[in-house]
Amino acid sequence: RRSISGSFIGSMEETEELLKFCADRGVSSTIEIVKMDYVNKAMERLEKNDVRYRFVIDVAASNL
């Protein structure tokens, strides 16, 4: 009952290297920021393929 697992995103060092590479070249991602009260609607949009950018949930700005 043991398992070995890994990550496909690389090590912390590789992640930092990639972030620096992107910062040096002005590479960024396009996102749509949503609050927690919009999460259910965001999920509905995902099911309908009505999403153009990656959703990022803004927990700090949400009324929890």
Image (cartoon, rainbow, N blue to C red):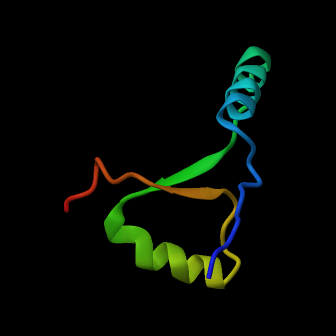
State the image coordinates of residue 22 (x, y, percent, origin top left). 75, 26
Relative to residue 45, is residue 61 depicted above or below? above
Relative to residue 60, is residue 3 depicted above or below? below
Q: Nearer the viewer, residue 20 or 32?
A: 20
Count of marks overlaid on the render: 0
Task: Look at 75% across and 15% down and name the residue there.
Answer: 24
- Quarter of the view holding residue 62: bottom left
State the image coordinates of residue 59 (x, y, percent, origin top left). 33, 54
Is 44 displayed left or right of 57 in the figure? right
Q: Quadrant of the N terminus?
A: bottom right
State the image coordinates of residue 60 (x, y, percent, origin top left). 29, 47
State the image coordinates of residue 12 (x, y, percent, origin top left). 65, 34
Relative to residue 55, is residue 1 depicted above or below? below
Task: Look at 70% across and 66% down and name the residue there.
Answer: 4
Q: Nearer the viewer, residue 21 or 2?
A: 2
- Quarter of the view holding residue 49: bottom right
Relative to residue 51, is residue 26 depicted above or below? above
| View extreme (left): residue | 64
| View extreme (front): residue | 1
Is 18 displayed left or right of 53 in the figure? right
Task: Look at 51% across and 72% down and name the residue there.
Answer: 42
Is 61 displayed left or right of 25 in the figure? left
